[in-house]
Amino acid sequence: MKKIPIGVSSCLFDQLANSGAIPKKDAVINEATCHFFEFFPFAVSEEADLTVFPTTHSEAIIRPGSDYGECTQLCGYIIKKKSLTSESEVAKNFGNTSNGKDSIGLEALKIMRNFPLLPVEEDIRLEDACFRDNFFKRIHVVYRWQLLKKEGLTAHGLIEFHARHKLIIMSHADYRDLGQLLAGLTKENLAEVANQYILQLMNTLLTVPTRANHVNVLQHIQGYLKKELGRDDKAELCELIESYRNCEVPLIAPITLLKHHFRKCPDPYIQSSYYFAPYPSALGEVYP
């Protein structure tokens, strides 16, 4: 299996090298992440360059790869937290934001500004299960996007990409803006619409999903079973979704029951969706 390339502050990577063994499970770089990700360390001076707005704007960071020296486009970046950022600093440098960026350090924000398609997170924030889940999810969205472009971007491919991520998008925000963007897709404007789409998608995914949005997604998915479920099964599923809404059970509980029903009554759309498995489960609990 080809590992996904991730940039990382060299000091975090050095912690792994100096330990003589794989760090504890809750470390940023652990046995699970090393199995799925290939880490590219950035020296202090290299990382500082990423925070300077490039003369020629770039949306990607390219590093020499380990496979036959080929170049590798990074799908994520983990930065060592260096400073606290006040709300006024964020407003001064990035304007009025409403997506939770004010809790991220200024260095990370500058990299995010310079490379808007690159998922960036701080080591401290990745100790939080919700931020870690969202970071892993965004990494895999970018990775799948890169594969789509490598295969050759087409209108059909872009629409299918959106369809497979639609339920994930719904858990973050209203998906209709992205849908309307694709509604005007033609062969002539494919490149322009695709660029707008991925920028808007990655910005949308910066917002951590809410419980209310997940309930909306779960009920939407339940609708695909309305003709297949009996009264008792339907009542059980509704009750479990309500229990999740009321913080009585984790999200994995209704998801597990839904997956059970779809194994009995497969649906092509739900099977193709990434919502139930946005990234390998070995990386940790999906949707804590």
Image (cartoon, rainbow, N blue to C red):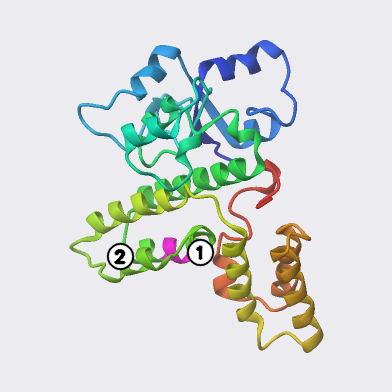
Tags 1 and 2 touching, CB below 8 Å: no
**What residue is at 74 percent from the left and 57 percent from the top?**
250
- Badge 2 local density, few (<14 within 10 Å), some, or many (20+)? some
Residue 68: % across, % down: 44, 26
* Quarter where residue 191 is shown: bottom left
Q: Is residue 264 left or right of residue 221?
A: right
- In this view of the protein, can residue 120 be seen by the observer? no
Whichever of labels 1 and 2 marks the residue nearer the N terminus, that label is 1
Query: Marks 1/2: CA distance?
Result: 16 Å
Q: Which of 81/252 is in front?
A: 81
Residue 177: % across, % down: 35, 65
**Residue position for label 1:** 170
Residue 95 lies within the magenta run: no
**Residue reaching furthest front?**
88
Q: Amino acid at mark 1?
A: Met
Q: Main secondary structure of the magenta part?
A: helix
Q: Amino acid at mark 2?
A: Leu
Residue 198: % across, % down: 36, 52
Magenta-drawn segment = 160-164
Residue 39: % across, % down: 54, 27
Answer above or below: position of 218 versus 135: below
Q: Secondary structure at mark 2?
A: helix
**Residue position for label 2:** 181
- Badge 1 local density, few (<14 within 10 Å), some, or many (20+)? many
